[in-house]
Amino acid sequence: MKVVCLYGSPRLEGSSATIANHFLECAGSHGATVQTFALHRLDYCGCTSCSACKKQLDRCIINDGLAPVLDSLYEAEVVVMATPIYFDGVNSKIIAFMERACSYFKADWVESQEDCRLTWGKKLVFIITQGQPENVGRDIFGRFEEVLEQLGFKERHLIRACGVNEPEDIQRREDVLELTEEIARKTFM
Ligand SMILES: Cc1cc2nc3c(=O)[nH]c(=O)nc-3n(C[C@H](O)[C@H](O)[C@H](O)COP(=O)(O)O)c2cc1C
């Protein structure tokens, strides 16, 4: 199984990357191949609404740092997206990626799976870390669920770690690490 992991946070030793890496270790032990992208190191923009992916090409026309990331998802069976919460939302690198993921859609309005260039049935592990407690920002993942389904992510798992700011906070969160392992077991069984 091929796993593609997108680190949204600029902190590659931060809390979201620490959880993602724990999942990737589990993936490796199940024999998965892993490709990672540190989005913060890539120079790219959000969607420019040019419609080239609908009218001219079968992909995004913008040839920037995100192009290899967008290409990698064609082969991925499992995608991991790890993001810190910034100002009550996913961070800017993940949001810009989500905007550009619209280039996988053949039409402006997605009515069926046929309208998506990615294959149906992929698995998604979405990792959110935030400083605020659990009752804050509960809806953030839900904002993306419809589009994630349209992108072919049939199975979607959320790992949310709240009240964490530093990597060592995660090391103390056995509940989060255990949930990560359980999701890895379900993903690769
Ligand atoms: C610019 C910025 C904005 C933030 N906004 C929020 C917020 O709105 N809600 C929240 O709970 N935490 C917020 N945080 C805290 C981070 O989400 C939290 O520290 C997270 O665990 C960092 O993840 P990382 O170590 O993977 O970067 C913010 C942090 C930064 C730097």
Image: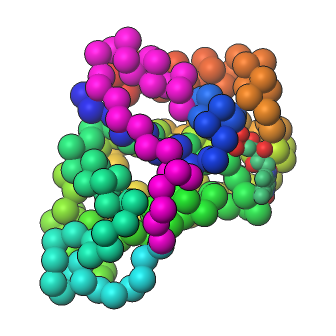
Quarter of the rendering containing residue 188 = top left
Quarter of the rendering containing residue 176 = top right
Percent x, y of residue 112: 22, 68
Any magenta on residue 28?
yes
Quarter of the rendering containing residue 48 = bottom left
Can residue 48 be seen from the camera position used here? yes
Q: What residue is shown at x 33% (from left), y 87% (from top)?
A: 50
Percent x, y of residue 171: 73, 19
Q: Report the side of 84 relative to 135 (left or right).
A: left
Quadrant, the N terminus: top left
Percent x, y of residue 151: 32, 59
Q: List the single residue furthest toward the top.
A: 29
Q: Report the side of 186 relative to 158 (left or right).
A: left
Q: What residue is shown at x 20% (from left), y 75% (from top)?
A: 106
Q: What residue is shown at x 70% (from left), y 53% (from top)?
A: 85
Percent x, y of residue 172: 78, 18
Query: Vertical placement of 98 versus 178: above or below?
Result: below
Query: Vertical placement of 92 versus 132: above or below?
Result: below
Can residue 142 be seen from the camera position used here? no
Any magenta on residue 37?
yes
Q: Nearer the viewer, residue 175 or 25?
A: 25
Q: Nearer the viewer, residue 20 or 138?
A: 20
Q: Report the side of 112 relative to 180 (left or right).
A: left
Query: Vertical placement of 79 versus 91: above or below?
Result: above
- Start-end of magenta stretch: 20-45
Quadrant, the C terminus: top left
